[in-house]
Amino acid sequence: MKKGDTDLFFWIGIELVSLLSITFILIMFLTLANATVSVVPTSSLGQIGISLPRAITTIPATAETKGLLITINSSDEIYVGTTQVKVADIPSLLASYISQYGTPTSVKIAADKSIPYGTIVQLMDLIRQSGIGTVDLIVGQER
């Protein structure tokens, strides 16, 4: 064998550093994409009987249950989880939730599409007065 032939042999190969970089980027992408999945139990929404407004750019709801979910059905009945509450009870309920579990990073509101905008704004204002900065509005996904 000539010396030049062996040099060519060592040039042909796969660089592991670039493969590791690509693998790391792929893992990070999948982790971040999974972390942004909405965490609303769709089964509880069906039990309460709401019809969510639709949007194309939404992330679909999953069966996971994390955080605090407030639901308003078409009869203006407000539910925290599956318990019906009144608007006046929201500040005290949030205060007891915060003292028991700590301040949630966000509160999710799932409101029927027939609910007036003012009702949702009033609820969001009460949530923010309790010290919770992020309020997520849950919508259904257009197909």
Image: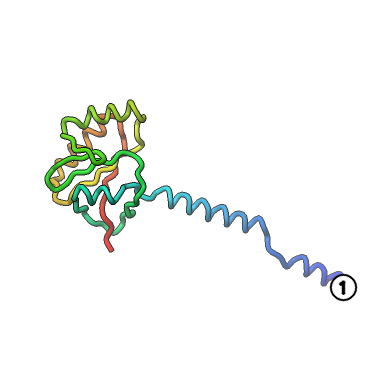
- Residue with the mark numbered 1: 2
**Residue at image location 13% in from the left, 43% down from the top:** 76
Q: Is residue 2 above or below residue 113?
A: below
Identify the residue at the far bottom of this view: 1
**Residue at image location 30% in from the left, 38% down from the top:** 68
Could you classify mark 1 by the number of other residues whose Cα lies within 10 Å: few (under 14), some (14-19), or many (20 or more)?
Answer: few
Return the residue nearer the eye: 16 or 5.
Answer: 16
- Residue 15 is left or right of residue 119, and the answer is right
Question: In the rendering, at what x and y percent does residue 10 appear?
Answer: 77, 65
- Residue 21 is left or right of residue 5, and the answer is left
Q: Is residue 106 above or below residue 46?
A: above
Return the residue nearer the eye: 33 or 101.
Answer: 101
Return the residue nearer the eye: 100 or 14.
Answer: 100
Q: Is residue 139 above or below residue 79?
A: below
**Residue at image location 82% in from the left, 69% down from the top:** 6
* Quadrant location of the N terminus in the rendered image: bottom right
Question: In the rendering, at what x and y percent does residue 99 appear?
Answer: 33, 26
